Amino acid sequence: MPAIAAGAALIMAAGLTVAACSSAAAKPAKPAQPTLKHFSAVYYEGSASWNCSGTRTITAGGSAKDSETCLITGVTNGYAKMVGTYTGHPGVKWPGSKPGSRPALWHSDYNHAVASAWTITITDTHHVGFSGADNYQAHITAFYDS
């Protein structure tokens, strides 16, 4: 999974616009509500493509959580060995990593920030795609400090 390991995430959504207002007569502000932003990204790894979409939740304190799903299609030979759940705090070594290689970091598909903690689960959909190979899904949950 070189695209993930190398942190080749694309920035697919605009940043937040924050408006501030100050006034001596202003009422105390209510706590901010969480902000939700939807995003999508497409990656190509060899002849396989990752079509991803997700939601970023930004808390009142400024921390964030990404939840996304990627459908992995095309020539997916070799993905069977990737089936499983992986967790990084912030890095993890993927199956087949070379000895002495650095742990892979997760970069957000929303804004390319490095996650402080993340989990990715890769599953075989058992659906054969146009290439004759199985399609896979990746479910990602990632957290970002403020």
Image (spheres, helix red, strand yellow):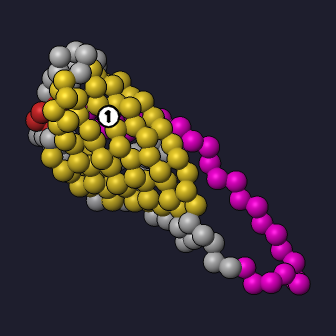
Circle 1 residue:
71
For image coordinates 33% across by 25% down, the residue present is 49
Q: Quadrant of the N terminus?
A: top left
Residue 42: x and y in percent read 42, 30
Please report the bounds of the magenta region as a residue range.
1-29
Q: How many marks?
A: 1
Q: In percent of the image, x 20 and y 51: which residue is there?
A: 86
Residue 62 visible in image: no
Most foreground residue, 108 or 91:
108
- Residue 108: x, y in percent? 43, 46
Closer-to-camera residue (72/14): 72
Label 1 crowding class (10 Å Cα cut-off): few <14, some 14-19, many 20+? Answer: some
Tell me the element at label 1.
strand
- Residue at x 37% of width, y 55% of height: 142
> Is residue 2 left or right of 13 when viewed as pictured?
left
Kindly report the secondary structure that dominates the magenta region of the rendered protein.
loop
Q: Above or below — where is 49 with respect to 143?
A: above
Q: Quadrant of residue 60?
A: bottom right
Residue sitting at the far front: 127
Q: Which residue is drawn at 28% across and 25% down?
A: 73
Please, what is the three-letter code of the amino acid marked with disc 1? Answer: Leu
Q: Where is residue 8 in the image (x, y as percent from the top left)?
A: 40, 34
The answer, for residue 43, to whether it is visible in the render is yes
Q: Is residue 119 magenta?
A: no
Q: Within the magenta stretch, is there residue 9?
A: yes
Rendered view: 71 above or below 64: above
6 vs 142: above or below: above
Relative horizontal placement of residue 111, taking residue 140 as reference (left or right): right
- Residue 124 percent location from the top left of the image: 17, 37
> Compared to 121, does 134 lie above or below?
above
